[in-house]
Image (cartoon, grey):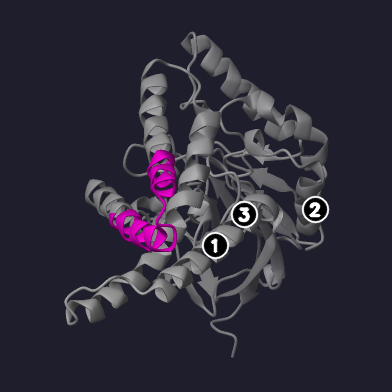
Amino acid sequence: MTKRLILILILFIVGDIYFYQAFSTVFPQAYAHSLYWLVDGLLFAGIFALIFLRRAGRDVQNLSAGLITSFLLVFIPKVFTFPLLVVEDVFRLFQGFPDRILGISEAVLVLALLFILLLVFGLTKGRHFYKVKEEVLYFPDLPDAFDGFKITQLSDIHSGSLSDVKGVQKGIALANAQHSDLMLFTGDLVNNYASEMDPWMADFAKLKAPYGQFSVLGNHDYGDYASWENQALKAENLKRLKAVHGEIGFKLLLNESVNITKDGQSIALIGVENWGKGGFHQYGDLNKATEQVPADAFKVLLSHDPSHWELVTLDHPKPIHLTLAGHTHGMQFGFELFGFKWSPIQYFYKQWAGLYSRSGKYLYVNRGFGYHALRGRVGVWPEITVIVLKKGTSKG
């Protein structure tokens, strides 16, 4: 991961240097050059301030979000436009490196402006630009009664970041409009504090499904990223958050399972606490969660972090048919066009958005309902997932 971060940093630096060449070609005035580097300097000064304040135990959530948003607006247009200047340099190489062509530099700046406008849309309207993603999955051993059973999945609400009441209500209404049989939530209800849900309790309590609403915890729900005067306060925050799930109508699954019964047949719904690779805590215990589940039962697992699927779930002795996860947010930035999808998060998570399968077992990674750190979404829009379970081996 460190090597990847270094490569990204190098890409940003190279992009910045190249973009400056286009900028200085169009704006040769000295004051414009000074302004260009002043913006860069302020951003990097903000990073050092963030590191200092965090080490001092200060709450840096707002500063962090502001810096991430600023970096996105300043550096992303540069990274995606400087390749035009590289192409120009290929031709300049054979011409003895004459001055840059003004028209190409102007084109680079115009293209960068278009990127900025896209970013502005994402940072404003993109927060609640909800997309319904539906997948129909076939299983030969699905109980007959569950043929056509619909599941709506939400993930990563991050209520501490939400501010637009109408926007949030729009997403909740859209989730209910899917008329699914089961409503599932795969973690990160808050950023850090249970109190972040206080303004949103009545709204999220409107989420309903005839066969119930169930949830699990995500890495942000434990209060691990906040500074606490003592462990007792942290424990009390977690206790309160667990109660919030019940108060909005969700049964919180803590390394346990329940049976969903229909017409005398049932499937096992399993929920584990957060389990993630790298520096994330591994509170989840799949063995404990499946203690009461027969090996031949049809199983749906809620596990916040998708890395749990490949590292634990796939090889579990009690096969898990379908795992639902979230966590990545698709990094809230990327491109998904004509079947192609890309986001920087894919260099850190193999499974980061959408459907994955292996040996007849499925993982679906929800892109998230809310947002965190970056105050919006660009290209990777907030998601409401609908999974339809079908009896059989394929659409044919």
Q: In terms of secondary structure, where does tag 3 sit?
A: helix
Q: Residue 48 got which mark?
A: none
Q: Earlier in the sequence, mark 1 or mark 3?
A: 1
Residue flagged by tag 3: what amino acid is it?
A: Val
* Residue that mark 2 sits on: 170
Residue drawn at the location 76% of the way across and 63% of the way down: 263
Q: Residues within 10 Å of mark 3 (few under 14, many from 20)?
A: some
Q: Nearer the viewer, residue 284 or 35?
A: 35
Task: State the predominant SS element of the stretch in magenta.
Answer: helix
Residue 229 part of the magenta-drawn span: no
Name the residue beneath numbered marker 3.
Answer: 120
Q: Which residue sits at x=19%, y=81%?
A: 95
Q: CA distance from mark 1 to mark 3?
A: 10 Å
- The quarter in which the C terminus is drawn is bottom right
Q: In the rendering, at what x and y percent does residue 162 appear?
A: 68, 39
Query: Which amino acid does the dot numbered 1 rest on?
Result: Leu
Picture quadrant where residue 89 is located: bottom left
Q: In the rendering, at what x and y percent does residue 361 appear?
A: 45, 67
